[in-house]
Image (tube, rainbow, N blue to C red):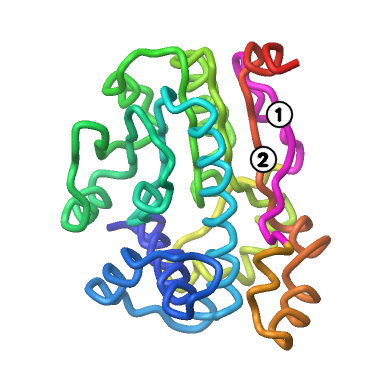
Amino acid sequence: MNATNKTLYIPLYGKSLVSKKGILLHDPKAEEIWQKEGFPLRGKPKSKWLAYYMGMRAWVMDQWLTEKLNTDPAALVLHLGCGLDARVHRVKAPSSLWFDVDMPDVIRIRQQYYKETPTYRMIGADVTDPDWLDMLPHGEKAVVVMEGLSMYLPMEKLQALMDALSRKYPQLSCLMDVYTCFAVKASAYKNPIQAVGASVCTGVDDPKLLEQGNLRFDGCLTITPEEKIQELSPLERCFFCLMFAGKTTEKIYRMYHYESKEKIQKII
């Protein structure tokens, strides 16, 4: 497993930690896998503050996806860069077909903990290789979640991926977290992923740069919602709000939402 793929253990640990604490995210699967995999993380990757970030980010994405599927259960789900994440178990909304996609060596580990069903599949592929899209069924509607993926793809490949997805599914919703350009520069000196030998290459300050095909930027979601911050202890809330929420977060880390142009027009 290369350095970039090893970054999956950082959110896995974070989700496991907050789940054990009984805050932010209920994720017994993360607890189970972390106990068995036990990748040796040290320093910043094991920070409880980073774990809180991971828990909140996952919860926000879960809520967004739940709302999408409750509105349109016929939509196909694509979870790109899935790692060992248990979103398919956490999201209880109905889905017609769900695909978890990651590099082949990651999926081989994932297959030890997850089983395919008639409505759940796993694909081992490089998402920057357009051929993997041929493995997907044709259809009109898809919902895409990219968690902790965009920052590891060169801009041109990220744009090509967005374009390919928009051409494959005319009615598309997509949610992704991104680093800002400032965060990419800062990462060269201080980033938890350095502990596993990885580095980031792409920051996206202007969300319109990822408007490809019929996809259009449709707004930002907060990564640190107030209702989740309230689950922390009083002292933790004060420190978290001061150091990790609000304007501080927006300077380094954002969550962008995209919709197909046709879908936005129908809503309007």
| Tag 1–tag 2 contact (CB < 8 Å) | yes
User: Label 1 is placed on what type of residue?
Assistant: Phe
Residue at (72% x, 58% y) in the render: 252
Residue 256's disc is: 2
Residue at (42% x, 78% y) in the render: 20
Residue at (72% x, 35% y) in the render: 207
Residue 217's disc is: 1
For the C terminus, give its image quadrant: top right
Q: Residue furthest bottom?
A: 235
- In the picture shown, does residue 35 fall above or below 126? below
125 or 47, which lies in front? 47
Graded by Cα atoms within 10 Å as few (under 14), some (14 to 19) or many (20 or more), the crowding at tag 1 reads many
Marks 1/2: CA–CA distance: 7 Å
Residue 145 visible within the image: yes
Graded by Cα atoms within 10 Å as few (under 14), some (14 to 19) or many (20 or more), the crowding at tag 2 reads some
- In the image, residue 149 lies at what x, y percent? 49, 47
